[in-house]
Amino acid sequence: MPTKIDLNKVPRFAELPIKPDKPKESSWGVFGDDDELGCLNFLTPQGIVDAARLVRKGSVFRLDTKINYANPPLFARRPAKHNIMSFESFGLLGFDDSLDSYNTQEGSQWDGLAHVGSPRYKAFYNGVKSSEIKDGPTGRLSIHKWANKFVGRAVLLDAFRYRISHGRTIDPLKSEKYSLDDLKETAVADGVELKPGTILLIRTGWMQAYLAASPEDKAAMAPLEGLKACGIEDSSAMVEWFWDHRVAAVGTDCPAVEPWPWDFKNEGALHYRTLCLLGLPIGEQFNLEELAADCAADKRYEFMLVSVPMNLEGGIASPPNAVAIK
């Protein structure tokens, strides 16, 4: 389990960084100079016990998209090829299979902390250098270090439903932003509380819109330059809200959490603010449709979440392999 921490001793966002030589608005060193878990440290054994108490009706909602759900894949990635191989030549009635060209970010995913580093500081979370990101057990910030860490209380903010129900339209297939106020208002309307150690899921409506799109429109969205998608604003106030509420991770149903495209030269981009500076895992392309419908029906937007990232030593990202349990 993550190291037990005293939440009373964790600095607020306004007090970051804890040392003058650390980047502005970074949590580097807060959990120790060698820490590789970042905000997953907010997930505690007691938090898991409390999350288990949220299971009341035994409903399970898979949050991963099907492999190759995006056809063609987004961001010009190659599709995975599924091969089924027979053992008949060995005298055995049986099969096994392989996935060729499988990209761990082809669909639903957690971005690991080695996914994006700071151009200014030429380092990843907690000062890890590019030379330390490598395959195998010694690879820093590897996804396999999350293999048994991602369990706890989660909540859903159905920001898309809230905005539409209040007559404020948004086109998820355009580069439009959800503001911090949108999220706060959704939380108040649905009675959602961000307790320490919460895994926050945000529905933007993008997945619903993509799945309903025509084959021609999906093909047009596949190249990097062809994709436009909604997301949440990349402000300092947004990440302050996450940090001061001790959010453990943020998962969304859109391709990049923040609107796509985002400027890689913009030091205030949300990918830099979260993954690199705060060590806050972000998730993309989650399928929240069935879960959102159930939450709207029973008016209960909190649940237990179990996510088991790939046990891949040196891994950069992983499908979440996640279920919400109510």
Image (cartoon, grey):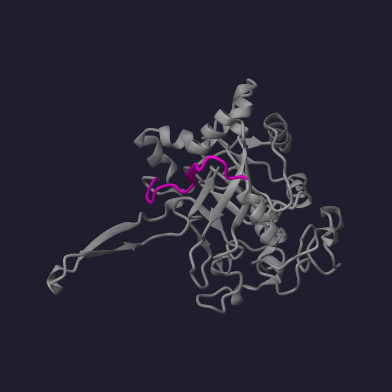
Residue farthest along the bottom direction in this orientation: 138
Count the marks: how many?
0
Q: Which residues are magenta?
A: 54-69
201 left or right, relative to 189: left
The outermost residue toward the top is 167
Task: Look at the image and tell me in which quarter the N terminus lies.
Answer: bottom right
30 and 22: which is toward the camera: 30
Q: Is residue 91 left or right of residue 207?
A: left
Image: 75 above or below 37: above
Please tell me whether residue 213 is drawn above or below residue 323 in the rendered image.
above
Q: Nearer the viewer, residue 222 or 45?
A: 45
Instruction: Give the x, y percent position of residue 231.
Output: 60, 41
Q: Is residue 111 visible?
A: yes
Q: Position of residue 64 (x, y in %)?
A: 46, 49
Left or right: residue 60 versus residue 92 is right
Judged by its main secondary structure, the magenta piece is loop
Q: Residue at x 60, y 44 (%)?
A: 303
Q: Residue at x 49, y 68 (%)?
A: 311
Q: Closer to the camera, 130 or 247? A: 247
Residue 296 place in picture, x, y as percent:
57, 30
Magenta segment includes 62: yes
Q: Residue 197, image x and y in percent?
A: 70, 53
Q: Residue at x 75, y 52 (%)?
A: 243
Instruction: Answer above or below: position of 188 versus 101.
Output: above
Of residue 305 and residue 261, the one placed in the foreground of this image is 305
Q: Looking at the figure, which quarter contains the C terminus?
A: top right
Magenta region includes residue 78: no
Q: Quadrant of residue 25?
A: bottom right
Q: Quadrant of residue 188?
A: top right
Is there any visible trace of residue 276 in the rendered image?
A: no
